[in-house]
Image (tube, rainbow, N blue to C red):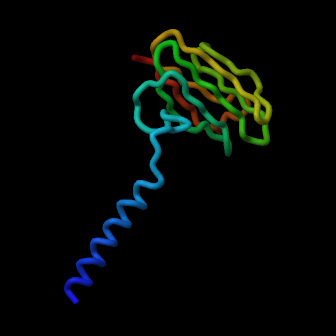
C-alpha cells in the first residue's frame, strides 16, 4: 500500500512538472508585455478602446508598431508632439522609431476616454 502511494505521488509530481513546462516558450511575440527590459521592437494593439500593453520598453533606435484591432478608427498621438499616427482604420498599422531616450506618453485624440499609454526608451 505504501509503495502504491509513493508511486502515485511521484507520478503526480512528474505530471505537474511536465504540464507546467508545456505552455512555456522562449519565443514571445511581444517580449515587452512583461518586464521592463528594453527590446529592439515592440508591438501595441489597440483593442477594446485600450492600448495593449499600456507600457512598452524599447532600446534607443528601437521601434514600436501600433495595430488598430477595433472596429473604429484610433490614433496613437504623443502628448509632447513627438509622433502622431493620424487616424488608423481597422487593421491599419503605424510604426515609429525612437532615436532619443525618454518617456513618451501618448493617447487617442479621437477617444478622450481611453487611458494614456507609455513608451519608455533607453539602454
The residue closer to the viewer here, 104 or 7, is 7
Q: Position of residue 34 (x, y in %)?
A: 44, 39
Left/right of residue 4 with respect to residue 57 in the rendered view = left
Quadrant that contains the N terminus: bottom left
Q: Position of residue 48 (x, y in %)?
A: 67, 45
Q: Is residue 100 above or below residue 90?
A: above
Query: Residue at left 63%, top 40%?
Result: 50
Q: Position of residue 63 (x, y in %)?
A: 57, 20
Query: Which image quadrant for residue 68?
Result: top right
Left/right of residue 59 with respect to residue 67 in the rendered view = left
Q: Position of residue 103 (x, y in %)?
A: 47, 20
Q: Is residue 81 above or below residue 93?
A: above
Left/right of residue 13 with respect to residue 108 in the rendered view = left
Q: Residue furthest bottom?
A: 1
Query: Residue at left 40%, top 28%?
Result: 37
Left/right of residue 39 with respect to residue 44 in the rendered view = left
The residue closer to the viewer here, 61 or 70, is 61
Quadrant that contains the C terminus: top left
Q: Residue furthest left?
A: 2
Query: Residue at left 50%, top 30%?
Result: 56
The number of callouts visible is: 0
The residue closer to the viewer here, 123 or 24, is 24
Q: Is residue 100 above or below residue 44?
A: above
Query: Residue at left 38%, top 67%?
Result: 15
Amino acid at each position: 500500500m505504501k509503495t502504491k502511494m509513493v508511486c502515485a505521488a511521484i507520478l503526480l509530481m512528474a505530471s505537474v512538472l511536465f504540464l507546467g513546462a508545456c505552455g512555456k516558450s522562449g519565443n514571445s511575440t511581444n517580449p515587452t508585455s512583461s518586464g521592463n527590459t528594453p527590446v529592439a521592437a515592440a508591438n501595441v494593439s489597440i483593442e477594446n478602446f485600450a492600448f495593449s500593453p499600456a507600457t512598452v520598453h524599447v532600446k534607443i533606435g528601437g521601434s514600436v508598431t501600433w495595430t488598430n484591432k477595433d472596429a473604429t478608427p484610433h490614433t496613437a498621438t504623443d502628448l509632447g508632439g513627438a509622433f502622431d499616427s493620424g487616424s488608423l482604420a481597422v487593421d491599419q498599422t503605424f510604426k515609429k522609431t525612437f532615436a532619443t531616450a525618454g518617456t513618451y506618453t501618448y493617447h487617442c485624440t479621437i477617444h478622450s476616454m481611453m487611458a494614456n499609454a507609455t513608451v519608455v526608451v533607453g539602454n
